[in-house]
Image (tube, grey):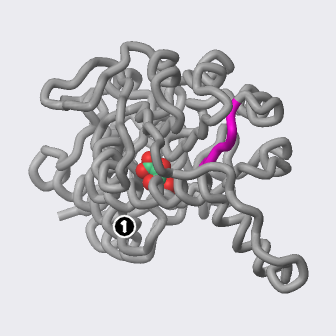
């Protein structure tokens, strides 16, 4: 039987590429000398896409008249216009669950790093300041007694909440709606959540609905003891408003794993002392990334073998 033709938009992990090559005829967009010419030639043959970090919209879909499925790497899929995919009758899958614990672990690590300035303390030691100048200055913030406001209590948000409970933090949340069976106090607006907490954990997905949801008003409601952690998407925070709030002392500090224009990190944030910045490493262990990649492969195989995906995005169900 002829192998289905699929397109890969960027290089993927070796374990993924090996399996895709075995099951499919793979066209590598990133390796094409002339991507437009390549798409014109293979576009009509392509039935599936193994997607990482490419935008899928009407114009992109128009190049693939016989496309059946976009199998996207990552749990977030704000780069995929699902309405356009529904119109084009293209299935979209993502890679939930397999990264939940890893991202939650990273979120807690980033929160503690930020509150207790652990990255800055390590730099102090590495720069020889411990011997030259003495101990690192006492952190003016502590984790103890904090209230964690979670923006986006989905799978990852809940895993973060579970961990934070064991640290003795009080927890509250905001999301599109109050969740049945969840005992944490619910706030119907982000400003109300920010008023009620001093540590705002952003786990919300990107996209138009959450664009710049964390704005100057929310930051002002968080207050001078406030710390913002973002492990979701950079677009959810108005970065200029965040830099203003940090510079003016409107809030205390921030820990960011995601940014508006990755891989660029704003100079203003880089200069601030109580800010911890990570290069989008939330899910970035070999084991977890392999598991995510495996799900990209398994969704494609399942689709072409049974006509059903394993982990369709909610809009498809
Ligand atoms: C990955 C992520 O960094 O799953 C997501 O939505 O943001 C991360 O796990 C990304 O998807 C792939 O590079």
How far across and how far down the image is residue 248, in percent?
82, 30
Vertically, is 173 above or below 71?
Answer: above
Q: Quadrant of residue 178?
A: top left
Query: Which secondary structure class fits the magenta region best?
Result: strand
Q: Quadrant of residue 316?
A: top left
How far across and how far down the image is residue 243, in percent?
77, 34
Determine if the magenta segment contains residue 252.
yes
Determine if the magenta segment contains residue 282.
no
Vertically, is 204 above or below 188?
Answer: below
Residue drawn 60% across the image and 40% down it: 227
Secondary element at image label 1: helix
Residue drawn 67% across the image and 43% down it: 253
Q: From this viewpoint, is residue 178 visible?
A: yes
Residue most extreme to the left: 306
Vertically, is 217 above or below 219?
Answer: above
* Label 1 beta carbon within 8 A of ligand 1: yes
Task: Count neighbours of disc 1 (C-alpha within 10 A) and say few if under 14, some if 14 to 19, many if 20 or more.
Answer: some
Asked whether, in this view, residue 254 is left or right of residue 75, the answer is right
Near-viewer residue (54 or 305): 54
Instruction: List the residue tagged with mark 1.
Output: 288
Residue drawn 58% across the image and 26% down it: 222
Magenta extent? 251-256
Q: From this viewpoint, is residue 71 visible?
A: no
How far across and how far down the image is residue 207, in percent?
50, 27
- Quadrant of the image containing the N terminus: bottom left
Residue most extreme to the bottom: 131
Asked whether, in this view, residue 139 is left or right of residue 295, the answer is right
Near-viewer residue (53 or 125): 125
How far across and how far down the image is residue 235, in percent?
60, 32
């Amino acid at each position: 039987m002829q192998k289905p033709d699929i397109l890969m938009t960027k290089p993927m992990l070796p374990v993924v590429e090996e399996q895709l090559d075995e099951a499919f005829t793979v066209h590598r967009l990133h390796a094409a000398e002339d991507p437009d010419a390549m798409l014109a030639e293979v576009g009509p043959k392509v039935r599936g896409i193994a997607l990482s970090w490419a935008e899928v919209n009407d114009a992109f879909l128009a190049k693939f008249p016989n496309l059946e499925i976009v199998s996207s790497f990552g749990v977030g899929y704000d780069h995929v216009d699902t309405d356009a995919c529904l119109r084009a009758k293209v299935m979209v899958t993502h890679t939930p669950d397999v990264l939940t614990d890893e991202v939650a672990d990273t979120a807690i690590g980033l929160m503690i790093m930020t509150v207790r300035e652990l990255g800055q303390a390590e730099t102090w030691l590495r720069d020889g300041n411990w011997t030259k100048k003495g101990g690192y200055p006492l952190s003016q913030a502590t984790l103890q007694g904090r209230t964690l406001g979670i923006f986006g209590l989905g799978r990852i948000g809940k895993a973060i909440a579970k961990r934070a409970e064991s640290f003795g933090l009080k927890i509250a949340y905001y999301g599109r709606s109050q969740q049945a069976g969840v005992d944490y106090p619910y706030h119907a607006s982000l400003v109300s959540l920010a008023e009620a907490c001093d540590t705002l954990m952003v786990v919300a997905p990107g996209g138009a609905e959450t664009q710049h949801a964390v704005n100057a008003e929310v930051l002002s409601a968080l207050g001078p003891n406030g710390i913002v952690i973002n492990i979701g998407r950079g677009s959810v925070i108005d970065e200029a408003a965040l830099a203003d709030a940090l510079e003016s002392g409107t809030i205390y500090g921030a820990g960011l794993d995601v940014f508006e224009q990755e891989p660029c990190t704003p100079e203003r944030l880089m200069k601030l002392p109580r800010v911890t910045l990570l290069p989008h490493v939330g899910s970035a262990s070999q084991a977890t990334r392999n598991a995510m990649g495996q799900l990209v492969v398994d969704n494609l195989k399942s689709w072409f073998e049974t006509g059903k995906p394993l982990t369709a995005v909610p809009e498809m169900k």
